Image (cartoon, rainbow, N blue to C red):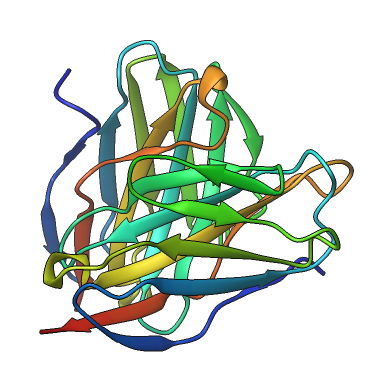
Amino acid sequence: DAGVIQSPRHEVTEMGQEVTLRCKPISGHDYLFWYRQTMMRGLELLIYFNNNVPIDDSGMPEDRFSAKMPNASFSTLKIQPSEPRDSAVYFCASQSWEDGDEQYFGPGTRLTVT
Amino acid sequence: LAKTTQPISMDSYEGQEVNITCSHNNIATNDYITWYQQFPSQGPRFIIQGYKTKVTNEVASLFIPADRKSSTLSLPRVSLSDTAVYYCLAHYGGATNKLIFGTGTLLAVQP
């Protein structure tokens, strides 16, 4: 398996633009997580899905953020409109219910909002 | 309010045993503690997990005392390549049902 795939790897955009981050989890995994990592706040869980259903979105910072998982092999995290304070590395991770909390992380998307 | 904290940094030398502690309140008997390792420009990588008093795998050990208010990651004989940031992940189950990463510990291994 190629592991968790994220795209793009780097994104530079201007304030006010819409940004869409994409994730393909490991085949057969039934949990998918979106995280944000910054120097100031560390690793923050934004939202996670189980069998494509959002379970906990309490970490989503505000209404500008939205996430979808239309099927078991694809998820998106959208920011609209983007702001400079959204600049961070966004990680997607997937996990099988059989593996406890052993999550497999993607390489991340480095987002810069100018 | 669930909170997970770690020391900001630690120094060690090659060949030494390193113990990194994570403080987490309100962990129930069956709640998992998981440890991850992260290198620059990479996603975190799983090291070990468990909910019992002691768990050991081929690279590390995890100790959780009876009060379950902390856990310790033990790396038996570190090498230069173990220089990384280490995160604990506390799974607060029950009514809380939250996954909260610790603040991360930068381990610097010197020759």
Residue B16 falls left or right of residue A102: left
Q: Is residue A16 visible?
A: no
Residue sitting at 50 percent across and 75 percent down?
A: B103
Tell me what residue is drawn at x 79 percent, y 38 percent. B30
Instruction: Give the percent coordinates (x, y) of residue A82.
Output: 34, 65
**Quadrant of the rendered image containing residue B90:** bottom right
Please, which residue is most extreme toward the right here?
B95
> What is the tally of numbered marks visible in this picture?
0
Quadrant of res A17: bottom left
Q: For residue A50, which quarter of the picture?
A: top right
Between B83 and B42, which is closer to the camera in this rendering? Answer: B83
The image position of residue A97, as x and y in percent, is 56, 20
Q: In this view, does B27 lie to the left or right of A65?
A: right
Q: Determine whether, in the image, residue B99 is placed left or right of residue B76.
A: right
For the N terminus of chain B, which image quadrant? bottom right
Q: In this view of the protein, which residue sits in the foreground, B75 or B106?
A: B75
Residue B32 coordinates in the image, percent (x, y): 66, 43
Kindly identify the residue that appears in the image at 69 percent across and 57 percent down: B64
Quarter of the image with the C terminus of chain B is bottom left
Residue A69 appears anywhere in the view: yes
**Residue at (45%, 28%) from the top-left corner?**
A95
Residue A62 in the image: x percent, y percent? 57, 62
Left or right of A69, for residue A27: left
